[in-house]
Structures are given as C-alpha cells and as structure tokens.
Amino acid sequence: MPKLKTHKGAKRRIHVTGSGKLMRMKQGKSHLRRKKPSRVKHLFDQKVGVSVQDVDRLKRLLPYS
C-alpha cells in the first residue's frame, strides 16, 4: 500500500498533543483586534480542542500524527 499524504493545510492548523488530542486556535485572532477588549484578546491565545464531530475527518487528513 502506498504512503498516505498529509494534508498540508490541516497540518498547519491542527496541533496533536502527546495523548493524541487535536487542538486548534480560535478564529478572529487578527481581524479588527484593536477594538476588542484585552480580556477577549487573551482568550484568542489559547488552543481549544477540536469538536467531536470533526475528529474522524481530521485524523484522515493527518494520517501520521
């Protein structure tokens, strides 16, 4: 069987933890950031777990993670 190719867009956007969890960054981090309060800006810096519905689809895009 041939080697599977990693989806490069998913590789840049999704981080896989040591335990195998998929993490992503929140959207809206850089758009219109000046008018957002600093409390909200700090929330954008944290990684969030990928929703359960998307995990199987993203694992297919990242076969060797």
Image (spheres, grey):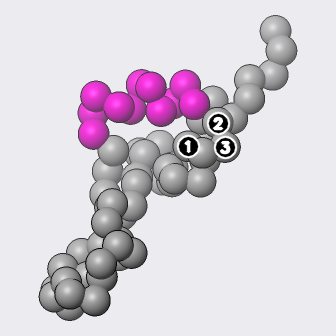
In the picture of the structure, the residue carrying the numbered disc 2 is 7
Image spot of residue 18 (x, y percent):
51, 52
Image spot of residue 34 (x, y percent):
28, 89
Q: Are there few (<14), some (14-19), or many (20+) residues within 10 Å of tag 1?
A: some
Image quadrant for the N terminus?
top right
Viewer-proximal residue, 59 or 36? 36
Amino acid at pointer 2: His
Q: Secondary structure at mark 1?
A: helix
Kindly indicate whether the residue at mark 1 contacts the one at mark 2 (C-beta within 8 angstroms): yes
Is residue 46 in sight in this rendering? no
Q: Residue visible at 69% across and 35% down?
A: 6
Q: Which mark is residue 19?
A: none
Kindly indicate whether the residue at mark 3 contacts the one at mark 2 (C-beta within 8 angstroms): yes
Amino acid at pointer 3: Lys
Horizontal side, residue 4 vs residue 51: left or right: right
Amino acid at pointer 1: Ala
| Magenta residue check for 37 | no
Q: Residue visible at 40% across and 54% down?
A: 24
